[in-house]
Amino acid sequence: MASRPALYAHPFSSYSQKVLIALYENDIPFEYRNLESEEHRDALARLWPLRRFPVLVDDGRTIVEATTIIEHLALRHPGPVALLPHDREAALEVRALDRFFDNYVSTPQQKVVFDRLRPEADRDPYGVAEARAMLETAYAWLERHMVGRTWAVGDTFTLADCAAAPFLFYADWTHPLGDRFPNVGAYRRRLLARPSFARAVEEARPFRPYFPLGAPDRD
């Protein structure tokens, strides 16, 4: 009998949460190798010298990058929730939205956060301003895109929503949506109510002091 896949991840990491949502959506048994543990951090460094996470080890294979891990799970551990449509054209839209949330929401959001972690003399106010401008543009595009939609590609929860949930969660902490983007705000609330993401948020709650901008007293 094959062993359970092992996930090297941290509860407060947005990319870790992206994979956790996929695991929880289909109730896939796995070993959670929480990177709060030095032992697991050392093991991660041996598996993947870049030390980026999450990383999945499954049946002797090491799979890196959150999207690839979710696609691997869909192939090797399919469940009732098909996070990638079987129709190839529909799957293209899901992948495009997944890249949108990775590149135009998560990347600028993390730019702002990582800049705050630098010594003050090494901070990049111009880069932070560019990142905030990118978030504004992404929010505005998503506001139009979500008209009449429940999830990122329509009525079905997919890989794109696995990405949207943690990335919009932290983006709103970093560069608040306010009242200017009601469709995006409503989508974020639906994501927070999804049991798979609600579970990930609760698991991460003890680590909120790690957020360098100060976690807001909400969510």
Image: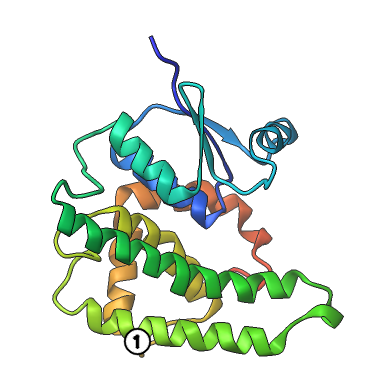
Task: Identify the residue shown where x is 64% and y is 33%.
Answer: 47
Query: Which one is nearer the viewer's eye here, 130 or 109?
Result: 130
Label count reads 1
Task: Identify the residue shown where x is 63% and y is 84%.
Answer: 128
Residue 218 visible in the snapshot:
no
Residue extending farthest front: 88
From the image, which quarter does the N terminus lie in? top left
Query: On screen, 205 above or below 78?
Result: below
Residue type, label 1: Ala
Task: Identify the residue shown where x is 25% and y is 48%.
Answer: 83
Q: Position of residue 178 (x, y in %)?
A: 42, 86
Task: Identify the residue shown where x is 38% and y is 82%.
Answer: 139
From the image, which quarter does the C terminus lie in? bottom left
Residue 123 visible in the snapshot:
yes
Residue extending farthest top: 1
The secondary element bearing badge 1 is classed as helix
Left or right: where 66 falls relative to 117? left
Q: Position of residue 206 (x, y in %)?
A: 60, 51
Left or right: where 45 falls relative to 207? right
Query: On screen, 73 above or below 159?
Result: above
Residue of label 1: 140
Query: Which one is nearer the viewer's eye here, 29 or 145?
Result: 145
Q: Position of residue 110 (x, y in %)?
A: 59, 69
